[in-house]
Amino acid sequence: MSDRFTARSERKAERSPMIRAQRLVSLSAAALMALAATVFVAAAPASADPAPSRYPYSNRDVGFSEVGFDFKTPGGIGDHLDRIQGFVPGRTPIIRAWTDFHTYASKDDATGAITMDFSHLDKSVMEAHRKGMRPLVTLFGSPSWLNGGHIWTANPTQDPPETWLPTDSEAWKTLVDLTVQHYGPPPGSPPGTPPIVDAFEIWNEPNIDGFGKYDGVYGDDGVIRPGDGIYDTAADATATLARYWELVKIASTEIHTTCGQCYVLAGGSAGLGAIHGDAARSPSAWLDWGYAHGYKDTFDAVAHHPYSEMNEAPDTPKCGAPWENLFGPPADDTPGQICGELAALRDVMVRRDDAGKKIWGTEWGYGLITPNPAWWWSEKRDQLVKGVRMWQAQDYTGPLVLFSYRDSEKNPYGIVEEKGFVKKDLALYDDLSLAFTNPDLRVPYKSQSGIGGYDLSDPRDRVVPFDYEHTGKLDHLLVYRPGTGIVYVLRRKTTVGTERPSFETVFRSTNGIGGFDLSNANDQIISYDFAHTGRQDYLVLYRPGTGIVHVVGHASDGSFWPVYTSTSGIGGYDLASTKDRLVAYDYEHTGKLDHLVAYRPGDNVLFILQHSAAGPFTTVLGSHQGIDGFALTSPDDQVIAYDYAHTGKQDALLLYRPGARLVTIVGHGAGNTFWPHLISSSGIAGYDLADRRDRIVAFDYAHTGMADHLVVYRPGTGYLDVVRHDPTDTYSAVHVAHQGVGSVGWFDLRNAQDRIVAYDFGHTGSADHLLLYRPGGRAVTIGTR
């Protein structure tokens, strides 16, 4: 990490009382590996065996960059790694470790032989490998015989000496070769065995004085000539940059000669105040220089440390100086300008025709000092979770490495204290663990200004997925504003190549639709299969409390006309209460939502209505006692149709009472009989339904064409779970988020007005996307698995 936090990090953080996070389990102490001190001398490369395939690292991989592993815990390194694994269950952690050549490499003055003592590094790398983790080794540090004779001088502009870049290319080559061979496949392994280490980062933050120095003059001929022996930030900047890329090329050649499937990570990874406002020293400028001078093929991924300033969020825009936020908003969020260094790096890679490579976040986090107040901890929790979500949402990012899981004496960046105790904010541990282990939904579309020309500027606005083109796909959106007559129908526009998704208006009215004027603030609309075709290509518009109801069809010329109108309810249900609601339902198990459930929460009334091709609507079930297993006696009660049996038919009813934890799922048998599949008074799949704001939506999470998952969410809080009905007839959460979908900057579900509907974004015939919108706030996000 850079020196921006040094002053504050010198003070050891106070110890708070021991607090255990809900998912922090007590782990048995693991004995330290008995590793003899091992000294390696350069050897000839091993004979070529069949190379194993390259491990497909992605932005779902999570790593930890620990300052040191000699922690004062009973189990030592083994216990420390077990606790890291406990923090990210179900993941294979990456463990970043430094070679520290300045401490452990030696050169014999008489013979010139170079050796490396790996015993210290082995303690973490070998133990991590033994536990099935993936070590990432940072090749760093130069002793005086490697860096041109630099030693401690007590001059802060010249020290520490190990941060001087190597001047002896052959010695650097030897040290790289020793390291790669040492961490190749274990001795005696069969051909094709992967190496112990398959990813090497070339130096740490070489673009700042605190970690990268080189004294020289870079000539127009591309040759670096000796300098005056003193490092000067301005005069030696280009020589330092050029020498770094030479070292990358040397290391890359050695690594790939021995290990063809290994990853080489390179780049000037630091910024913020440490580059003193010099844009030429920014990570993107360093990377661009490397491309411009022929180093494109010397690295497999870009190493980056996406830090933000301590008091700023990951998405804080720095449009005039993107290096002042090494994270920053994605380019898609700031069209026409680059407002963060991550976007700047990506821009360089795209312009240099190298967009296939990934950017690895090999070190990232925030200093977490225990004495800060509660609001500060809440802010840092949100910023950390936001950063993880933003990182995972980009298609060009690789692993993200947290600095760090545990504090060391001078670096309070850990999630837990040096002795392993969880820090002051319990939710920080749990929410960050959840963000790392439970990837967010993919976000193909987001907007802060409405959608398709509809501004969503009014709290009354509502969105209804609708089969406008009679294709059997809920791939259009009807958006309306009850009480005003305003109604639009939107469709997703056809895109070409990498063009971003967008929407357009195909119907617009300010006086209602199909004869229904939408002049009452309580007006409601649902889509419905009136013609028994398996298509929800009709609209039911109704005004609870008045008996008024229309069923409206859509003609090929774009017009709408009423196929059914009434001022006294529908099918024997009077719609005389403002509490009345209608839901489309597959009563006959045909795969068609061609029946209507009419219910009155608080009055225990539930009717099921049928439309006959030969006549009007009729009642097939009329109950004033709710339905088997659930009494609709609370005004908060809700009913939805749901595919309980994974058949592609929404022929079960899910009834729930938010705030009371009650949920019942009923199936329909012979005649008018119903029986409960589930009766619960404690929520569902760990979601407690303890808040009156809770809502449930049926959703095709698995892209199977079946609305057999449930989205359970709590607007105003950020909570969203996706629940699955398991083959064992139990329920489990397959996705859990405490920050909504995407990142907090996209849609955080922190507004009480937030709503969600299931929608066919991809024109696949399945509502396998979620559309989240904020009436009155203009925000829209579409997410999917």
Image (spheres, rainbow, N blue to C red):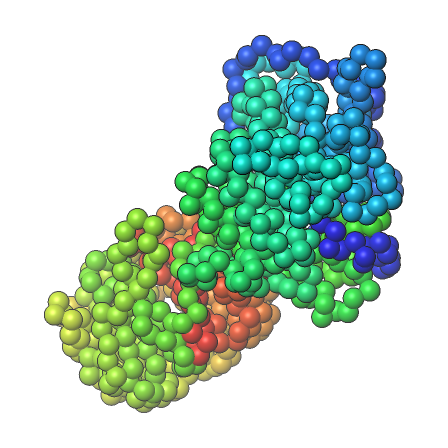
Residue farthest to the left? 557
On the image, the x and y values in percent for residue 498 come to 34, 50
Relative side of 748 to 603, left or right: right
Closer to the camera in the image, 17 or 410? 410
Relative side of 13 to 462, left or right: right
Closer to the camera in the image, 730 or 237? 237
Image quarter for residue 268?
top right
- State whether residue 654 is above or below residue 357: below
- State whether residue 678 is above or below residue 552: above
On the image, the x and y values in percent for residue 225 come to 64, 32
Image quarter for residue 775?
bottom left
- Count all numbered tags in the image, as a single digit: 0
Closer to the camera in the image, 31 or 746? 746
Image quarter for residue 459?
bottom left
**Residue at point 28%, 54% (across, down):** 495
**Residue at point 19%, 79% (across, down):** 514
On the image, the x and y values in percent for residue 72 come to 87, 42
**Residue at point 64%, 44% (across, down):** 237
On the image, the x and y values in percent for residue 108 come to 82, 17
State whether residue 581 appears in this view: no
**Residue at point 87%, 44% (across, down):** 154
Relative side of 715 to 133, left or right: left
State whether residue 406 appears in this view: yes
